[in-house]
Amino acid sequence: MSESAASSEFEAAFHKAAERHERVWVFVAILMLTLLLAGTMFIVVYAYGVVVRTDGFRRDPAAIEAPEGSIEKTGPNAYTVTMVARLWRWSPSPLRIPKGATVTFRVTSADVLHGFAIQGTTVNVTAVPGITGSVSYTFNRPGTFNIVCNEYCGLEHQGMLGRIVVEGDPA
Ligand SMILES: [Cu+2]
């Protein structure tokens, strides 16, 4: 047996063993990822009861009770505002309220996902078609607040701005 024949025999045996180990560990890795994914899904759905709703989504703006939003006075200085997002504007905007007003925003979308965030406040809610999100905020500081869309929604996303004007002293 020549020296080169011996070395190529050794190489062939080495590759055969290496391939077997490689196959085993690729399989183990895939199995671990599958178990991790299945386990996560199981825990999320069964233990936490999280279910993604798909039946209630509607994209027809006409299906929204107040397509241009609404403002309702609910107390001495309290308001409920239905805020509707659509490509690419907010309504009602500009929204004028007195200083110190507590506003409950009911946020929804007429078309796709948008993000309702009021700069300089803690308000940040996703506007989902067919679903109404709710958040309250008290505007103690007069001035103009920008509503920005922080959920990418297409071509004019960056220009999707609204205004909230908090005026002087409460009436
Ligand atoms: Cu948007």
Image (tube, helix red, strand yellow):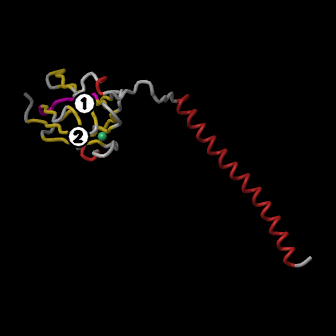
Q: How many dots with numbers?
A: 2
Of residue 122 and residue 105, the one placed in the foreground of this image is 105
Which residue is labeled 2 in the image? 147
Amino acid residing under circle 2: Ile
Q: Residues within 10 Å of mark 2 (few under 14, many from 20)?
A: many
- Secondary structure at badge 1 equals strand
In the image, is residue 137 part of the stretch drawn in magenta? no
Q: In the image, which residues are magenta?
A: 98-106
Where is ligand 1, by quadrant? top left
- The image shows residue 36 at horizontal and vertical percentages of 60, 41
- The image shows residue 171 at horizontal and vertical percentages of 7, 27
Marked residue nearer the N-terminal end (2 or 1): 1
Left or right for 155, reference 171: right
- The image shows residue 158 at horizontal and vertical percentages of 27, 47
Amino acid residing under circle 1: Met
Which residue is labeled 1 in the image? 83
- The image shows residue 144 at horizontal and vertical percentages of 14, 41
At x 53%, y 33%, the residue is 44
At x 18%, y 22%, the residue is 72
Is the C-beta of the residue carrying label 1 under 8 Å from the nearest atom of ligand 1? no
Q: Residues within 10 Å of mark 1 (few under 14, many from 20)?
A: many
Magenta stretch, main secondary structure, is strand
- Secondary structure at badge 2 equals strand
* Contact check, label 2 and label 1, Cβ < 8 Å: yes
Q: Quadrant of the N terminus?
A: bottom right
